[in-house]
Image (cartoon, helix red, strand yellow):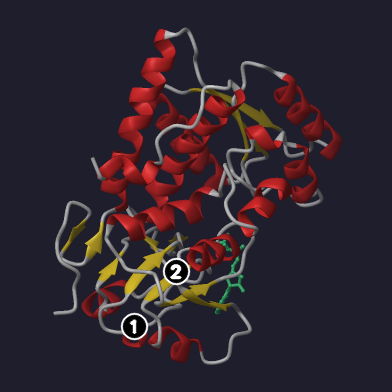
């Protein structure tokens, strides 16, 4: 039985992102309540453009999560026909609005709109997605104050499960700027030996078979075969794919991988809730730094007390 020992975050080899996310959210809720006593209300502005159905679901989840921890959210929904200049104008208005602590532009944006131009328009101090070139650059040269939510959530999951990283072989599947590249940097920072795989990788199975830790963000259901998994490995499945049956599934053959893995995240209930929790965390960090209130206690300490 290769499964990792049961703990508050892991049962029967399943790493419960929902439970870890709750532990991250609890101190955020406490902190916003303390700030509220001083008359400070944290505000997250969410910008959504067009009618992408997945984006609508994600935004709804983020707005709900804000309410849960006492963060005010403002939803700006623009029509798909809006111009790039109009989106930039809204972002600039939010940059200059002193009551706004965080700005999130929900991706993807409609075709014809330059995502990089919009992201670069966000004030780096309000960039709760951590995608601004300044924040990404800081991440790549060490640590950024606002780090991308999904990769940061993956790292906290590994930490919550007690997965050792130093000196271990980690394989990241997917090289997007949003997930694959930043999570690879974070794994390097944690002293893992990191291999990045992508759609041109020859013999993905051979890479996976060597990995003590696998983080998959490819958006291809069943891409990672259970039979490839090294016994005892930790598998973080970032994929969220909707099958024709309507069922949500990750990028990993779950049952087969679970049988071999030390620990594996489910879909749903794995990485997804962590992405949202880290967005709330980043909003708190952005607010406290901009208002010169210092840094909140690191999220990873949420379960060590
Ligand atoms: P995300 O937003 O989840 O990071 P993207 O769609 O931006 O996803 O990127 C998908 C990534 O997955 C790309 O880097 C791509 O190279 C990788 N990928 C897609 N298909 C495969 C495949 N069959 N094998 C390995 N990697 C793949």
Q: Position of residue 292 (x, y in %)?
A: 58, 22
Is residue 181 shown above or below 128?
A: below
SS of the residue under disc 2? strand
Q: Earlier in the sequence, mark 2 or mark 1?
A: 2
Callout 1: 10 Å neighbours few (<14), some, many (20+)?
many
Q: Position of residue 92 (x, y in %)?
A: 77, 27
Q: Is residue 69 left or right of residue 2?
A: right
Q: Nearer the viewer, residue 152 or 138?
A: 138
Q: Where does the C terminus fall, quadrant-wise? A: top left
- The residue that label 1 is drawn on is 229
Quadrant housing the N terminus: bottom left
Q: Can I make out residue 267 in this image?
A: no
As drawn, the label of residue 68 is none
129 relative position to 244: left or right: right
Instruction: Decide: is 42 above or below 283.
Output: above
Cα–Cα gap, marks 2 and 1: 12 Å
Residue wearing tag 2? 215
The residue under the point 40% across, 9% down is: 37
């Amino acid at each position: 039985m290769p499964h990792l020992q049961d703990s508050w975050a892991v049962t029967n080899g399943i790493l419960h992102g929902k439970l870890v996310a709750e532990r991250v959210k609890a101190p955020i809720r406490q902190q916003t309540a303390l700030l509220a006593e001083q008359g400070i209300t944290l505000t997250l502005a969410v910008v959504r453009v067009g009618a992408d159905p997945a984006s609508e679901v994600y935004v709804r989840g983020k707005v709900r999560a804000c309410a849960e921890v006492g963060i005010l959210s403002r939803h700006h929904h623009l029509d798909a026909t809006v111009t790039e200049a109009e989106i930039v104008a809204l972002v600039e208005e939010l940059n200059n609005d002193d009551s706004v602590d965080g700005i999130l532009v929900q991706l993807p944006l409609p075709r014809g709109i330059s995502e990089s131009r919009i992201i670069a328009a966000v004030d780096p101090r309000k960039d709760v997605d951590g995608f601004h070139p300044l924040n990404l650059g800081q991440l790549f040269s060490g640590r950024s104050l606002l780090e991308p939510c999904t990769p940061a959530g993956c790292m906290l999951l590994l930490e919550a499960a007690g997965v050792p990283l130093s000196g271990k072989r980690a394989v990241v599947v997917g090289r997007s700027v949003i997930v694959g590249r930043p999570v690879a940097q974070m794994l390097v920072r944690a002293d893992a030996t990191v291999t990045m795989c992508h759609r041109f990788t020859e013999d993905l199975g051979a890479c996976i078979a060597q990995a003590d830790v696998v983080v998959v963000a490819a958006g291809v259901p069943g891409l990672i075969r259970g039979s490839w998994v090294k016994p005892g490995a930790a598998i973080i499945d970032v994929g969220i794919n909707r099958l024709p049956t309507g069922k949500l599934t990750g990028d990993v053959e779950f049952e087969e991988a679970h049988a071999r893995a030390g620990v594996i995240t489910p879909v749903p209930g794995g990485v997804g809730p962590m992405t949202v929790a880290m967005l709330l965390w980043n909003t708190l960090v952005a607010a406290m730094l901009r208002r010169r209130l210092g840094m909140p206690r690191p999220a990873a300490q949420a379960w060590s007390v």
